[in-house]
Amino acid sequence: DLIKEWQEANLLPLVQRFYLFVGLGGTLYHCHYDLQPNLHVQLTGRKRFILFPPDAWPSLYPFPVHHDLDRRSMLDLDAPDGARFPEWPRARGTLVELAPGDALYIPPYWWHHVQSVTPETTSMAMWFFEFFPFSAGVPYGVSPRAADITLMRDVEELVGKSFPDAPGEEDCSKSRPVKAGQVAAFMRWLRPRLGLAASDAGSRDADRDALQRLLLRPEEVESMVLAMIQDRFDDE
């Protein structure tokens, strides 16, 4: 009743869906973040959460937006590769353990690494829509600490839209490996133009071929990216 009252007062978004999670001891949900706010309620057994704020992303190395593991960390928290991910020790998380009857609210863009710590666990997640019910376009629960990661996502999407959709990748809700490679090629082209060290990943020939598929000149896409970044900082 309280949740419904808050929704009718435009204080809480409408419930989008419910998920029921049933797992065995050691079941692991890799470190990731969600775009929607959610309330995780523990029914049986115990779960351990490690929570990181949105601005911890430089230390958690997220996969690109168009990757099939979008919103997940490339870092294995159980066996971190310090050579590949040298910034990971800077991540500072908060450990939370849920017992039956406990509930944990996870705001959008907050990273969470989840593991079942008892032989059997059952829990329910209540996902809310991203926006207030009577204020379309106003995101709910997104803190200023998420500004960088939301901008990063928007820039990647903008660059992605500058390439034509590859056959089979028209559905933006699914992974788009071709577009992920194209966006990565553009970013490698952009780095030295911004005074950043050139990336040694990828192939020069493959990157050149990818850039030739742009719908606009690379310099035009660069201008669009810089304008988006400037607009975001002006708004702040």
Image (cartoon, rainbow, N blue to C red):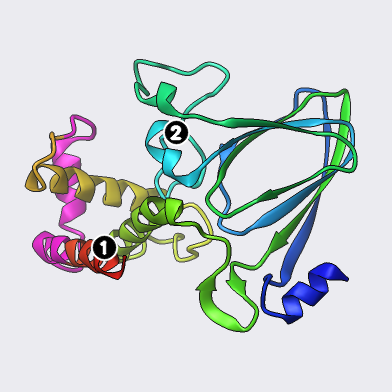
- x and y, in percent, of residue 190 in the image: 15, 49
Q: In the image, 210: left or right of 126?
A: left
Q: Which mark is residue 45?
A: none
- For disc 1, the neighbor class at 10 Å (few under 14, some 14 to 19, many from 20) is few
At numbered mark 2, what does the secondary structure look like: helix, strand or loop?
Answer: helix
At numbered mark 1, what does the secondary structure look like: helix, strand or loop?
Answer: helix
Q: Which residue is mark 2?
A: 60
* 91 over 181 or under it: above or below: above
The Cα atoms of the two marked residues, 1 and 2, are separated by 24 Å
Numbered label tally: 2
* 27 over 193 or under it: above or below: above
Residue at 36% x, 61% y is: 154
* 93 over 191 or under it: above or below: above
Residue at 71% x, 59% y is: 127
Q: Which residue is mark 1?
A: 233
Which region shows up in magenta? 199-223
Q: In the image, 99: left or right of 151?
A: right
Residue at 55% x, 31% y is: 93
Q: In the image, 233: left or right of 73?
A: left
- x and y, in percent, of residue 54 in the image: 48, 46
